């Protein structure tokens, strides 16, 4: 797919996510699955018309999703994570003093150097998506851990899929 088509699709998706942010829901939302899936995702965009506050990081279903998964040897953001990028970008816009560290990770396959580079590229992909949705580059830091911080140590596809991720860590709320 050509770059211009990707940019247009990302822009349209961002507009659609932000257009869905009209009113605050009064009933609690169930947390959505953040596992490595390729199925359809329900709308998890920000549920407030007003500004996010620090407490929303723990209560808003979309903001609680802080892990972005990637396909094997890929650093392109999967479509099901676009809404999450919109939520976190809105939080960054609403809270200019907040800061995020994006921790890029890879599975155990590949050399140490390759996995460190891949983790960095994945972190940069999430950073770019946040910035495309209105987040500030000054609020974002990318760190790559490569294969050094696995969440699963088995040698199978399910485990490897859980390790191919970027974790969104708020260092200042």
Image (cartoon, helix red, strand yellow):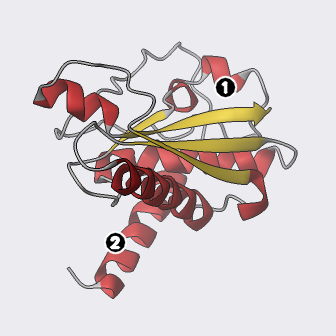
Determine the CA span between mark 2 and mark 1.
Answer: 28 Å
Name the residue nearer the viewer: 147 or 28: 147
Q: How busy is the neighbourhood of tag 2: few (under 14 within 10 Å), some, or many (20 plus)?
A: few
Q: What residue is at 43 percent from the left and 18 percent from the top?
A: 31
Tell me the quadrant of the picture where the C terminus can be found: top right
Q: Name the foreground residue: 149 vs 1.
A: 149
Of residue 5 and residue 49, the one placed in the foreground of this image is 5
Q: Which residue is mark 2?
A: 9
Image: 129 above or below 84: below
Q: Secondary structure at mark 1?
A: helix
Residue at screen point 49% across, 55% down: 120
Spot occupied by residue 20 in the image (x, y as percentages of width and height): 49, 48
Most distant residue in the left direction: 156
Residue carrying label 1:
57
Check disc 1: other Cα within 10 Å, few if <14, some if 14-19, many if 20+: some
Of the 4 image quadrants, the one containing the N terminus is bottom left
Q: Which one is earlier in the sequence, the residue at label 2 or at label 1?
A: 2
Q: Position of residue 10 (x, y in %)?
A: 40, 68
């Amino acid at each position: 797919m050509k770059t211009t088509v990707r940019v247009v699709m990302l822009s349209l998706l961002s507009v659609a996510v932000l257009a869905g942010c009209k009113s605050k829901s009064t009933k609690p939302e169930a947390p959505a699955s953040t596992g490595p899936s390729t199925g359809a995702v329900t709308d998890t965009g920000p549920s407030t018309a007003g500004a996010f506050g620090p407490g929303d990081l723990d209560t808003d279903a979309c903001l609680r999703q802080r892990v972005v998964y990637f396909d094997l040897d890929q650093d392109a953001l999967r479509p099901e994570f676009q809404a999450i990028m919109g939520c976190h970008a809105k939080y960054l816009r609403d809270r200019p003093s907040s800061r995020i560290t994006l921790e890029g990770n890879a599975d155990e396959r590949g050399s140490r150097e390759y996995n460190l580079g891949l983790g960095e590229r994945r972190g940069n992909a999430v950073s770019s998506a946040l910035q495309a949705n209105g987040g500030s580059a000054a609020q974002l830091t990318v760190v790559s851990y490569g294969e050094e911080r696995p969440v699963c140590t088995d040698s199978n596809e399910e485990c490897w899929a859980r390790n191919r991720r970027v974790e969104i860590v708020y260092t200042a709320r």
